[in-house]
Every structure is written in structure tokens, then in C-alpha cells.
Image (cartoon, rainbow, N blue to C red):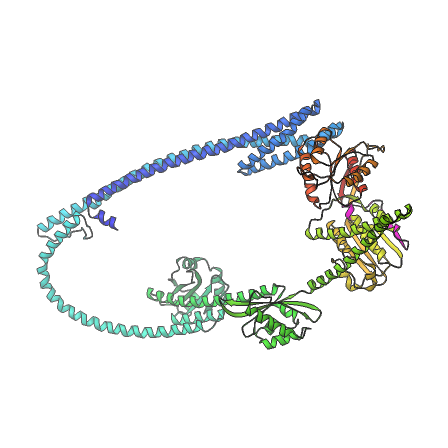
Amino acid sequence: MKIKTYLSSSLSRQVVFLMAGFICFFVMGTIALFAIQQHMNHAYFDQRKEILAKRYIADEIYDRFQTAFFNMRGYLLLNQPKLKVNALNQRDIIIDKTKKLEVLKSTVRDNTAYRDIQEFTFYYFDETLPPVIKTFESGDDITYKNIANNGATARINGFQKKTKAYKLSLDKQLDEKAVNLSKTQAYLQVGLITFIALLFILLMRMIRIIIRNIGRPLSDFAFAANEIAAGREAEITITNKRKDELGALAAAFKKMIVSVQDKEQDLIAQNQELFAQQDELQAQQAELEGALDFLTENEKKLTRRNELINGISSSLDKEEVLYTIVENMCRLIDADRGMICLLQEDAYSSFGISDYGVSQFRKNLECGLNQRLIASKKGFTVKREQMSQEKAFHENQNYSYDLYLPVLSASDEVGAIMVYSRYGGPFSEKEILEYETLARQIAISLEKIKLYEQSEDNRIMNQRILNTVQEGIQLIDREGTIVQVNQKLCEIFGGSLTIKDIIGLNREAWTKLMAGQIVEPAFKESLDQAIHTAAVSSSMDTSFVYTCKGNRVIKVYCEVLKNGKEVFGTVLVHRDITKEHAVDAMKSEFVSTVSHELRTPLASVLGFTELMMNKQLKPERQSKYLQTIYNEAKRLTALINDFLDVQRMESGKQMYEKKHLDILPVIQKIIGLQEISTVQHAINLEAHDESYVILGDRSKIEQVFMNLISNAIKYSPNGGNIDIKVYSSGSSICVEIKDFGLGIPEEAIPELFQKFYRVDNSDRRRIGGTGLGLSIVDEIIKAHGGAIAVSSEYGAGSTFTLSFPRVQMNFQGKSTVEQNGKLNYQVAVIEDDMSLADLIRHELLESGFSVNSYKNGGAALKSMAANPPDAVVLDIMLDDDEIDGWGIMGKMKDDDNLKYIPIFVSTALDEPERGFSLGAEDFLVKPYKPSQLSATIKHTLSGNEIRGQILVPQEK
């Protein structure tokens, strides 16, 4: 404002301001055009640099692949190992370039090229080259040529075409960027021409302003001065608002004219004063009459308004309130018919409108005049000619006036639309303003109803949330009256009770109701004590346990609710801990059982060991005692392994080494082992097919059948048949194990596969067991994608049915390797325990291996670097402070001469996943059978030499 005043007070300042504005506009426009051109050039160079970088990487990758292709073909033709090494070395370079391309990719074509390069790198270097090299080095020319003819060459050619196409697309992008730069520069030139035109227009505008504000006023002022000098009347057009020199000059001339005309005006004024007094009396009379009419009209309006307000404030029923609004508004504004419709909800009401008219209005709610009302948020009226159905018996041309009123919400949005029609009489602007005020009152009423509905919805939602909680929730106020509960509490204390039945009960009523469902007589005392403790201190235990009818165990927690420091209620949480209570009982029983199961074999081991140490025994008796000690040690090992299996399964760390496995030999092996330990039972095996192949872990599958068959024998104390049937059922292999022993009570079957569970029966208590076997079996079967089911008749025996997903094996070709019974393998044993090292060495020597033993990891690495063995048996915990087993594995995998040697870990650490991640061939946890180690090494080394036999898995 100060700047405007400063400029308007001087003509020279106005001219200077216009020139300065013109210069600023010219400078700013020039700078803007220059900045745009600079930004455009920088953007083009940056994009061109990025595309060239991707083009360079694509060329590098293409050249590296070409190098790999030529070197590999040269190797296959010339058999030069350097060409193979050079070809394989291209893989790391290509992967590095691919990572750089991943950083630069920005388009869909870049992403596609990146994925193609990744997939082809994996296909060529990881899937195609290893078998080609392997077959070529073994002398099998037909196989590696078949690999090339079966799609490898076509895929290489396809990849080359894709890479060339990608490079061409990058070249095309460069051309497009250059063309786009040319187009943008052309647009910039058009902008420059436009800017010059704007400058010319601005200059013309400045000249026009100067002529209008300075030249024309001076001309008019000169004309007025001449007229006044000639004695004629003249009007000075220059206003008093001007503060510059022309304004001051105009003010002086006006004062002069006024002084001349004052005397003439004094004579006229006296006559006019008389007429004015008469007019004043008439005006006062008219004013009094208008005031009377105004008061009368206001009284009518207030009466109608009170009726409207009372109608909309006396109910929370939306439909009733909407009808009250329409009816009272029609009377208040003298409308013949009307309607209100909410925009955000399916709610409306009408007065004097047919159902068809209501439907038509709602279908076009956001169209036509309604859209105008929503956009403007202001009421308006529309005059229209009456339709034939509105004229009744009238024949003349009549008009109707439609009034559109918005109902604005608290957020100033249109929440509802009101439309009223009046026949023959228009709505004035004053009336529209008044009716908009009434619409605000209506909006408040609708907001109140909306808040009520929202609070009711929230209450219902909160109740539904509480009903989903699996604990019974009970909120009581300070006097003990129930304020809120959930459905779970009703279920705990009688299914016939509903939430409405319980809410509002006083403390005496609901405690009496609950006490009737509870076994403990001291329930009320415990409840009072818990509530009192919660009110006194929040750190003290406020829970107690009670038993309901039906042997359900419930634990109650109390928590005080406060608003600041004021206590306004208490929350009681009733949690059903029946299952936890039962599990605790089973765990206690399990500890007692395990104590017996551990002490019994330990007593045998200690007793026979003491006899052998203190007495000279015959060789056959020593052998018998040693066999007994061995059997009891195996029993202890199996028991400990059960504990470890359960722990691994609970933590999700159980490892499975799944291979294609025929379960028929496994079952036959277990039957052979079990037949040795019993003479009372006859184990019968029925199988119709020669092979039942699954994908499984041999040791775990053996554990399953060992548990089930030994259970069938144990729980048939009087002997009898054990029938085992193996058969195919669709895509599954099923095994039925049936005994004719004690059987299982029907009520115990659902709990049979729970950990620690044992049937509560004296006959079974004498048999013994930990209650872990069947739970381990269930976990192993599920891990193999199978299922286990049990059927039993108490006293007549049980049948366990196992099912596994079946895998078919098609054998193509025959083995060309003949076993001559001789093993010419060198095995390195790295073990710091010399006793165990001697045991392993002895076992391997007897199995036909050559063995070198090492106690120190560093010495072992030096010796293996000079003379690589065929296999390594490695302990993890070594006395060597410099390197342990994990470090030895890492160094072997980093050495090209040692990285392919199979490593068999022999350790007491139960970390198989770490061992396999570092490249272990197998992971044996002490204690284990030495024969198991030698068999595993023999199987692995023999399997590595087999050629010509391909196993193709086909799942049904």
C-alpha cells in the first residue's frame, strides 16, 4: 500500500516504474530462456552419457561371451586346458559387468536385457558347460554333442541376436535423444519469438498507459479550463483520488467553481428545506408501517422456525427427522412440495412428490442443477414453466419456482441437498439467505444423528473385537456392576447366557452366578482378594486359578483402570488354561519316566563295567557283558536322540537329507533287527510290487519304522502276529502296521501324537516309554509330505497307517562300471582325540582305504596341498589354536586343488546346517557307528565314478 501511494503521488515516478518493470521483465525472460537452454543441454549430455555407458557394458558382455564361446569351442576341438580355464574365467567378468548394467538399468528394455544376460549366464556357465566339460573329459563325445544339438547352440544364437538387438536399441535411443534435442531447441526458438512478441505488446501497453494517465487528462483539463473561462459549465473529469500534480490542480479548480456556485445554492437551499421537512414526515410514517409489518412477519417466521427446530431435535431416528425437515420447511417457506436427499448415505425424504419423481431425482443426484449446487455451495432459485401435471384445471401459462439449498457439514462440504417448489411466487435473495441459515441448523441436527450412528457402530465394533478374544473379558465399575463382557465369558459360565443378560448385573448377582459353575468353594474370597490387591498395588500378583465344572481350569487376572489418578473400574481376564495345565501334568510325569528310563540302562552299564574291572572273567562271559553294555549304550543313545529330535523339531532346525529311497528294503532291515529281539512275535510282510520309491531321509524313515514296529511288539506282551502291508494307493505309498495286542482306548486316540502323552493304564505303565516316540514319528511323516492315521479296538490291537507321496524312477541305460572289490582311495583323518582317531583309522583300513591321520589342522592343510586325498574326515573342535574345523573347510574350498574333495564332518557339535553351508558332504554327530562313516565314504566315492546311469524322478 505504501509503494502504491508513493508512486501515485508523482507522474515521474509512475513513468520510471513502468520503464523499470519493462526492463525487469526483459531481463528475467532472457535469463529464463538461457536457463532452459542450459538445462536442456545438460539433460541431453547426461542421458547420452548413460546410454553410452550401457552400450559399452553391452559390448563388453557380448565380447566376453564371444570369447567364452570361441575358447570353449577351441578347447573341445584342440583339448587345450588353458582355453577351458579362459572360457570359465569369463563368467566372473560377465557377472561383474551384469552388476554394473543392473545399476544403470532404467527402462523395461534394460530390465529385459539384464534378465536375459543373467539367465543365459546361469544357463551357459552353470547348467551347460559343467556337463559338457565332464562328458568331454570322460571321452563321451556323443553326449556332449547331443547337449549342443538339443538346444544349446540354438539358445546361444538366440542370446546373440537378443544382445545385438539390445545394442541396436541403445543406438536408436541415442538417435532419438538427438532428434528430441533438435525438437526442443526448435520449441525454444518459438519461445524466444513469443517472448519478443510479448515484449512488443508490453511496450505498446506502457505507451497506452502513459497516454491514458497523463496525455488525455491534460487535454480534458485544458478543455474544462477554457469552458469555465467562457462562463459555461464544465465538468472536470479528473477525480480527487489522484495524488499527483494533476490531482492537485484539479482540486484547486474545483474549489474555485464551488466558491462561485455557493451563493446560488444558498438561495435554492431554503426552498428545498421546506420540501425536505414534508418528505421527512411522510418517511417516518412509512417507516412505522414497515416496522409493524416486519414484526408481524418475524413472529410468523419464529413460530415456524421453532416448530422446525423442535421437530429435528426431538428424535435420533434419521428417517423421522428427514421427514420432519421436509414437512416443516415446506410450511415455513410456503412451498407446495419438497425433498431432501443425503449425498453420502442412502437416505432421503419427500413431501408431495410421487415415487417416480423421487426415483428420477435420486438417479440424477450429481447431474444438472444439483451439480451446480454442490460446486457453488450456495442456494439459488430457478424459474420454469409449469408442466401439465402441475397446472391441474388451470389453462393459462403459469410458472413454478424451484429453490435449491445445500446442507453443509462441519467440514464445509455438501452433505445433503434440499429442493422445494413454489407455484406462482418467486423466492427473494433475502429469503434465500434466511433459508440457508435454517439449512445450517438442519446440518447440525444431521451431524448429531451421524455422530450417534458412528458411536453406535463403534460400540458394536468394539464388542465384536472383544468377542474375537479367546479370553473371557469382564469390565466392572467401582461398585462391582458389570459394564461390559465378551462372548467368551458367556461361554465359560454357561452357554445359555447372553451378553445382554450379564451386562448390568451387580456384584452379588454375577459372583453368585459364577460360583454356581465353579468347583472351588473359596471362589468369592479369592476374587475379592485379587480385586483388592490390584487396587492397592499394580506390582503385586493379582491372579488366581479356579476349576469350572467339566474340569476346565481358568486363570483370572485383575487390572485396575484409571483416568489419570482416578480409578473408574477393574478389568477381569478369565483365561482357559486347561490345556497348559494338562501339559504341565504330562511334563511332570515325563520327568519321572525319563528318570527311570535313564537310570535303568546306566545301572546296567555301571554294574557290568564294575564286574569286568574287578574280576577276571571268561572270554565268553566278557563278550556277553560287553554286548549288554553295548545294547544299553544304544538304548541311552536312542533316548538322548529322541530328546534332541524333539528339541530340533520344536525349534524348526531339524535337517533332512532327502534322496530317492525304496522303503521296502528299509522295512525288511527293521524287521530283521526286531526279529532278533523277540521270539514271541511273528512279523509278516506283504508287498505286491518290487519297488516303492519315495523322496526321503533314510535314517529318519528307519527311525519311523523302528518306533512303530517296536511299539507293536512292546504293546503285544503276550506275543502274536505283527502284520505289515505295503501297497500303492493312487499317487501315494501306504504302509499298514497291525498288531493284536492291548489296543488303545478311544478317548486316548486324539491325544496320541502329543509330546509326553502316555495312555493312563497300569498295563502300559509297566511297559515303559517316554511318550516321545509317536510325536517324533508324526513330525517326520509330516516333513516328508505324508500322513499317519491310527485305528484301534481296545483289547484287540491297533493299526497304524502311513502314507507317503510316491516317486517313480525310470532307469535309462546301464552302468558301465564294474566293481572289482578293491578300493584305491586315500582318506585324510583330522582328529585331535587320538583314541577316536585310531578307531576311525582302524575302521577305514579294514574297509580297504589308505589312511593318513593328522592332529593339527595346519599340518593337515600343508600335507593335503602337496598330496590331495580322495576324502577328508574332519573334527570341528581341534586343539590347534590357529585354525579349527570350520577354518579348514573354508581354506579347502578356496583352494582349486582341494575344493572338490568331499568332506565328512565328525563332531560332537549339532550344527549340520552350518556344515552343509560350508560344503560338507555329510555331517555325523558323535556318537555314531564307525561302520556308518566307512559306508558313507565308500558310497560317496563310488558314486562319483559311476557313468552311464541316469535316474529320472517322475512324481505321480
Is residue 746 in view?
A: yes
Is residue 671 in view?
A: no
Q: Residue at x 68, y 51 (%)?
A: 651
Q: Is residue 849 above or below residue 657?
A: above
- Specify whether 784 is left or right of 38: right
Q: Is residue 649 above or below residue 578?
A: above
Q: Position of residue 865 (x, y in %)?
A: 70, 30
Judge by depth and name the residue closer to the eye, 453 or 860: 860
Q: Position of residue 64 (x, y in %)?
A: 60, 28
Total numbered badges shown on the rendered structure: 0
Q: Position of residue 785 (x, y in %)?
A: 73, 50
Judge by depth and name the residue closer to the eye, 216 or 254: 254
Which residue range is magenta in the image?
A: 676-700
Judge by depth and name the residue closer to the eye, 154 or 352: 154
Q: Does the magenta segment cover residue 291?
A: no
Q: Position of residue 569 (x, y in %)?
A: 54, 70
Q: Does the magenta segment cover residue 697?
A: yes
Judge by depth and name the residue closer to the eye, 718 or 431: 718
Pick out the residue farthest to the front: 614
- Specify whether 535 is left or right of 919: left
- Specify whether 535 is left or right of 380: right
The quadrant holding residue 208 is top left
Pick out the residue farthest to the top: 78
